[in-house]
Amino acid sequence: MYGFRYEPGNEREVCILFGLLMPYLNEQIQRLGFSSFTLYLDEYTDIFPDCTILADKRKLRVEFELYSGNFKQQGHDPKKCDLIVCWKHDWYNCPTKVLELFKVVSEIKEKEGLNLVLHGPKYPDRIGRRWSREEFQKELKEKLPEADYGEMLKFINELYTTKGIELQTGRGRKIPTLGICFKKLGPVYPLAIEATGKAYISYFNVNVQPPEPLLSKENAQEIRKILGESEKMWHYIKASNILDLVSKLKKIIEIMLK
């Protein structure tokens, strides 16, 4: 037996796992639209993009990341990269093709019974746990009735193509979450959907002292009026059912995108 005792905890370990998985990547690379009857490492530069690989003699510029969202946070140019290879894909609106190794490892385990990553993070308190898109969606499907799941998934899929919005799965917490970012605010996520079918809104960042506002006073007042909530720093959005919740989320998003 061979593989990883713990899941990757940094970019270099993602590189090593990619090398380990290369014999299994033909199908995954083809799904991304690349021909891959042969797959070779061409050059590793350790500068952006990290390396080039040859997929049937086509040179692909590859960037390794622990989470795909790190690509955006580091300010990399998507036009200069053909493929992001990551452990977990948490950037829903990513303009670059992404190979998620977590998904590859899971498929190999299911199809061939080969467990290449034995445990979760070695230092969970240090790096936190980032949920993948598949984990969020799977949990959502398990928690909600079929009709409610369909409505919520339809709404989330609409968000993928909404200009001015980016989606990213959360880290930490026992429940997978999906954060909604409004680009004009910067890299903050004042709205989030839990895989339980609940959603919450944060008017302030309560993780810093003193708490910093995430929304303008005008937007906050308008949203509070719609939701009928008092001056709270954050709260769950009250709704009678999923359709009501989706309706309220759409109204909030409409205000934020003005």
Image (tube, rainbow, N blue to C red):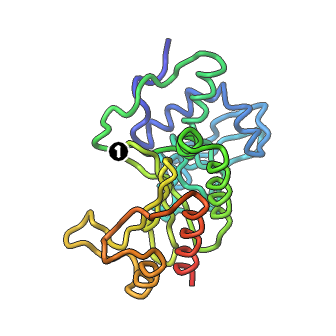
Q: Residue furthest front?
A: 240
Image position of 73 with respect to 133: above or below: below
Image position of 47 with respect to 55: above or below: below
- What residue is at 49 percent from the left and 47 percent from the top? 196
Image position of 28 with respect to 247: above or below: above
SS for tag 1? Answer: loop
Name which quarter of the figure residue 151 lies in.
bottom right
- What residue is at 31 percent from the left and 77 percent from the top? 231
Q: Residue furthest bottom?
A: 218
Q: Position of residue 58 (x, y in %)?
A: 76, 45
Q: Position of residue 101 (x, y in %)?
A: 57, 36
Left/right placement of residue 16 relative to residue 111 reads: left
Q: Nearer the viewer, residue 61 or 150?
A: 150
Q: Position of residue 165 (x, y in %)?
A: 57, 69
Q: Quadrant of the C terminus?
A: bottom right
Q: Nearer the viewer, residue 159 or 187?
A: 159
Whether residue 147 is visible: yes
Q: Nearer the viewer, residue 237 or 170?
A: 237
Whether residue 86 is visible: no
The residue identified by callout 1 is 128
Q: Give the residue type at disc 1.
A: Gly
Q: Position of residue 19 (x, y in %)?
A: 56, 31
- What residue is at 49 percent from the left and 52 percent from the top? 169
